[in-house]
Amino acid sequence: MMAVSINPFLIDNEIMNKNRDLDKVIRISIQAILLLLLSMYIISGFGITESRAIESITLGLLTKPVAFQVHNNLLLPFIIFLIMHIAYKPISKVIFKARK
Ligand code: HEM
């Protein structure tokens, strides 16, 4: 009977590729959320200082009190995602042991 040999280097490569994909998905997700938070931070900030303009641009949706509430509540998530964004590279190197 012929023995089926499995090339361990092929399996290793497959895992490495999956790791790299997951690494990329996490990194881009963090960047996208940070970009969203940053945009909301800036828009709600203008919603406070330029409330008339922003209220009419957003068809009356972003009123001054709403903008104030949004702006104040964004600080914590923004800091959390900013830390994740800056710390991700060294952390991913440890987790995924990726060859970068
Ligand atoms: C307040 C906003 C932001 C600050 C202070 C900031 C800061 C930083 C810092 C310090 C790094 C270097 C980290 C490292 O290489 O380990 C970095 C890398 C990077 N940032 Fe930001 N960032 C911000 C927002 C964003 C946003 C919104 C995006 C994308 C939409 C983005 C995309 C990137 C990319 C692509 C890299 C390179 C990552 C890598 O080499 O793996 N950043 N940023």
Image: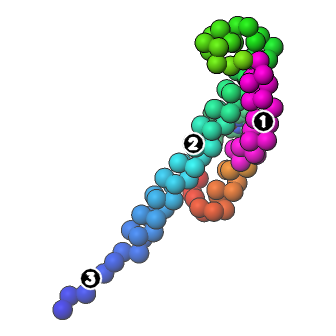
Q: Can residue 45 be seen in this view?
A: no
- Specify the label residue 73 is tagged with: 1
Q: Mark 3 points at which residue?
A: 4
**Residue at (66%, 62%) from the top-left corner?**
94
Q: Name the residue under label 2.
A: 28
Prevailing secondary structure of the magenta residues: helix
Counting from the top left corner in percent of width and height, residue 53 is at 70, 7
Determine which quarter of the picture holds residue 93: bottom right
Instruction: Point out the tag, 1 or 2, that comes first from the N-terminus.
Output: 2
Residue range highlighted in magenta: 64-85
Q: Which of marks 1 and 3 is in front?
A: 1
Counting from the top left corner in percent of width and height, residue 13 is at 44, 64
Instruction: Point out the tag, 1 or 3, that comes first from the N-terminus.
Output: 3
Q: Is 73 placed left or right of 16 in the picture? A: right
How busy is the neighbourhood of tag 1: few (under 14 within 10 Å), some, or many (20 plus)?
few
Quadrant (top left/top right/bottom left/bottom right) for the N terminus: bottom left
How busy is the neighbourhood of tag 2: few (under 14 within 10 Å), some, or many (20 plus)?
few
Marks 1 and 2 sit apart, C-alpha to C-alpha, by 23 Å
Q: Is 59 placed left or right of 54 in the picture? A: left
**Residue at (72%, 17%) from the top-left corner?**
63
Amino acid at pointer 2: Ile
Placement of 78 over or under 46, stated as above or below: below
